[in-house]
Image (spheres, rainbow, N blue to C red):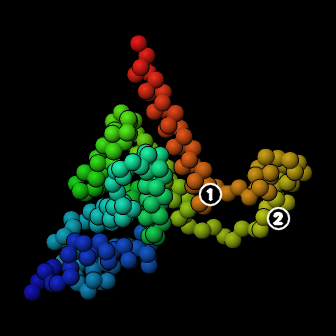
Amino acid sequence: MPASNRPGVTRQSMIDAALRLLDEVGLDGLSVRRLATELGVQSPALYWHIRGKQELLDGMADAIVTAAGMGPPADGEPWQDWLARRSRAYRQSLLAHRDGARIVAGAAWLSPATIRMFNAELAGLVKQGFPPSLGLRTISTLSQYINGFVLLEQAKPREPSADTADRLTALTELFDGDSSAPILAAIREGARTTGDEAFEHGLQAFIRGTAAALADRAEDDHVP
C-alpha cells in the first residue's frame, strides 16, 4: 500500500499532528520533513494532501480559528455579550498553541466552511442593526486587535527583569528623582500591558467605541 494511502495519514491527521509538533518545536522549528518523520512517512507522501508548507500552515490556522467556536449570537444574546464571549474564546484558542497568533497572522486563506461561518456571524450582527460594512470592520478590526495582543503575549521571553522595586528605582532616576511621573504611578498601581486585565481593558474600550459608532450611524440614517 502506498505510504500516502496508509491508514491515519489524512489531511486532518496531518494538521492535528502539525499542531502537536508546533507546541514542541515552535513555528521556526516546524517543517514538512519533520512532520513526515512525526507521522512515520516519507515527505513526498504528505504532498498528496498539501501542495507546500504554506498550505499546511493555512490548514493549521483554520483549525485554530474554528476551535474558538464560531457562530452568530445566540437567540436573545446582545451583540456586546457575543462579541466579548467570542473574543475571549478566540484569544484562548490562539494561546492554546505555541506561536498560535503567528500561525493565524501569516495565513494566506481560510477554508470555505470557515468563510461561510464568518458570513453567518456577520449576518448575526446585521440582524441586530449593523450595516454590513460596519459589521465587517467590527469583526475584522477586533480580530486584528486580538492577534496583535497575543503576538505580544507569545513573544520570546526576554531576560528575567528586575523586580518592581528595582524597576521603580531605575525609572525614578531616569526622571531625575521625580516619583510623581505618571509611568511610575501606573507601575505602583499594578498596571500591566499584557494579561487578562489589559486584554479586557482593550476589549471593553472597543465594544464601547463600536456602540457609539453604531448609534452615530443610526442617528445619521434618521436625519431628514
The amino acid beneath tag 1 is Glu
Quadrant position of residue 128: top left
- Residue at mark 1: 197
Quarter of the image for residue 129 reads top left
Q: Residue at x 56, y 47 (%)?
A: 204
Label 2: few (<14), some (14–19) or many (≥20) C-alpha neighbours in 10 Å: few
- Nearest the camera: 215 or 8? 215
Which residue extends farthest left?
1
- Where residue 199 appears, x then y in whole percent? 57, 55
Q: Look at the numbered disc 2 and give the secondary structure of its residue.
A: helix
- The crowding category of the residue bearing disc 1, from other C-alpha atoms within 10 Å (few below 14, some 14 to 19, many at least 20), is few
What residue is rendered at 39% in x and 48% in y? 76
Q: Nearer the viewer, mark 1 or mark 2?
A: 1
Residue 165 numbered tag:
2
The residue positioned 16% from the left and 72% from the top of the image is: 48
Quarter occupied by the N terminus: bottom left
Q: Earlier in the sequence, mark 1 or mark 2?
A: 2
